[in-house]
Amino acid sequence: RRSVLVQVSSEKSFDELQKYCGQIADIKSAHHYSVAEDDSHFILLEFEKDEGADAVLDASVFNQDVRGIPTRSQFMWFKTGPKVKLVRDEGKSQKDCRLNVINGKLQVRDDEIAEWLTSAESLKDQMNIVFQSTKLSDLGIRLRFLAAQQAQNSIVGMFPNAYAHPFGSSVNGFGKEGCDLDLILRLEKEEVETKESRLVFHTKANLNNGRTQAQRYMESVGDILQLFLPGVNNVRRILQARVPIIKYNHEYLDLEVDLSMSNLTGVYMSEILYMIGQIDNRVRPLVFCIRRWAKSTGLTNPSPGRWISNFSLTLLVLYFLQALKQPILPSINHFIKKARKQDMRVTEDGINCTFLRDLNLLDFKVKNTSSIDELLREFFEFYSSFDFNNRGISLNEAKSILKPDHSAMYIVNPLEPLLNVSKNLSLEETERFRIEVRNAAWILESDLQSSKNAGEPWGLVNLFKTNQKSLVRPQMFFKPRMVDVTDLFDKNDSPSPQRIDYKNTTVKRQVEEITRTTKTDMNKIHRHINSDGSSTAIRAKGASKRR
C-alpha cells in the first residue's frame, strides 16, 4: 500500500531518484532488481506512510508518447531530464536512504550451491544452506503483495469492499525464489461493517448460479487485466476448471500469476501451513531439502501431470513429523478443537475452515530433540517401508488410515477431508517414489559410514545428483510412458560398489533388508511386465489364426 515501483536505467539512478522522491515524502527502504530477458532495471520504493505513496502518485504524470488509456498505478518509470525542484512542507528535512538490496531477484546458481554444500562442515549445515539460499526473499514477498495491490486498485473504485491477497507458497513460508504467485481477488469482504442510513445504494441482483456468475466476473476481470494494467501480458482464462483461474505474466515483476475469485480454501490452507512452519524451526529446512531432492530425481515436475506435486510432498513431510514417537507437529484436529468463536470461517461452498489462528493458545510442546539431519534420514526410512497399497495419510488425525478408494497414493485434504490431495498420482510414479526414498536412505547411510575427503562431493551433493534416466522430459507430458524399472538402477556391468564396514550392526541389518526388499520388488515387477507381454502376444496370435 505504501510502495511504488520505478523503472530506471540502472541501480546507479538511485541517488537521483531518492533525492527527487525524497522531496515529496520520506522513503523508508529501497530495493533494486533487474529482469534478465530485456536487461530492465527497477527500484521498489517503500515510504514511511501510506500517504507518501499517494503523494508520489499525485506528483506523477501520464505518458503522452504512447497511445493508450491513461492509467494511474504504482508502476512508473523515471525519465531523464532537467532536475525539477519540488516544494516540500516547511520545517521538514529530506531523509537520506540507501539501497537495501541490489539485484534482489538474482537466484543462486545450482553450481554455486553445490560448492557451498561440498565445503560445509556437516549435513545439518548443508540443509540450512539449501534453505537459506533458495527460500523466497524479502523482496520477492514485497513484489507479490505489490501485484495484489495493483489488481485490487484496478476495481476498487467501483467495488469499495474489493480486496486482493496472495496465498499459497508466496506467503505460507514454504515458497522458493522464483515461485509463481497465487492470487485471490474478492469483490466483497466476508464481514462488512454496516452503518445506519436512510440512503441506500442500488445493487444489481445476480440471477445466475454462483459458478456461472463467477465465470462471467472473471471474464470481465481478465479484460481489465489485459487491456489496462501496465506490465500485464499473455492473459489466459481457464474458466472450466474446478477452481476457475486467470493466468498471466507480469513483465515488470518477472512473475507468473494465477488469479482466482473463489479459492478461499487455498487462502485458509496457506494460513494453517504458515502456522505449522512457525511451530518448529526444523520444519521448513526439512521440507526444502526434500523438495529439492524430489526435483533432482525427477519425482516432481513444474507442469501438472501424474507425478507428485510439491504440495503433496510437503504434506508427506508434515505427516512424518506428526507420526514420530515424539511428535514435532500436532494434528490438524488439535488446531480445530482449540478454535475460538473469532476463528470461525466457512466458505461460500459450505466448507468449514475453522481452526485456531493464535499459536500462543495452541498448548502443544515439542519434546523431540532430533537434529534436522537425523530427521532427513528418518524421513527416507519411514516412507521406504510405508504401505501405500493399503494405507492413506491423514494429517487431521496424525495417523494412517485405511484407503477409501483405489488411488495409488491417498493423502486426505486437511480442509476438505473428502478429497484426495494426491489423486493425480499414478501407480508408476508412486512406485518410483518408494524406490527413490530407498535409494536416498542408502546414499545417506553410505556417506555416514565413509570418511569425508576435502573437496569431494558428499551428503546432499550426492543426494541431489540428477538421475537422467528417471527424469520426465517435457515432450513426454502427454504421451504414455513405459519405464523398465531396472533402468532406475545401475547395470550389472557397472563397477561393484565399494564394500562398507558398518560400525552399527542394526544399521547394517536395515540396509541389507532394504536391499533385499528392493530386489524382490524389482523381480516381481519385471516378471509381471514380461508375463503381460507374453499374454498379449499369445492373444494376438490366436486372433490372427481365427481370422
Image (cartoon, rainbow, N blue to C red):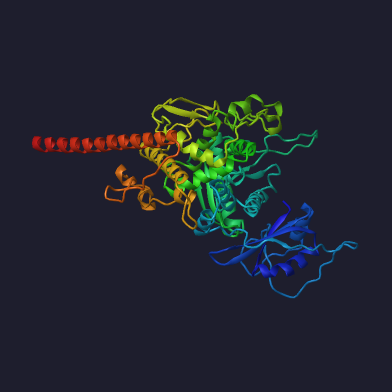
Rendered residue at 76%/73% (across/down): 83
Depth check, front residue: 375 or 396: 375
Residue 149 visible in the snapshot = yes
Observer-nearest of 142 and 265: 142
- Residue extending farthest to the right is 91
Residue at coordinates 61% horizontally, 56% vertically from top-left?
A: 229
Q: Is residue 531 above or below residue 160?
A: above
Taking the view exactly as shown, the residue that stands out farthest to the bottom is 82
State left or right for residue 123 relative to residue 88.
Answer: left
Residue 160 position in % (x across, y down): 71, 44
Left or right of 441 on screen, residue 331: right
Name the spot of residue 102 as percent of width and height, x first: 65, 63
Residue 238 in view of the camera = no
Rendered view: 185 above or below 52: above
Q: Quadrant of the C terminus?
A: top left
- Can you give x and y, in whole percent of width and height, for residue 497 in the image? 35, 47
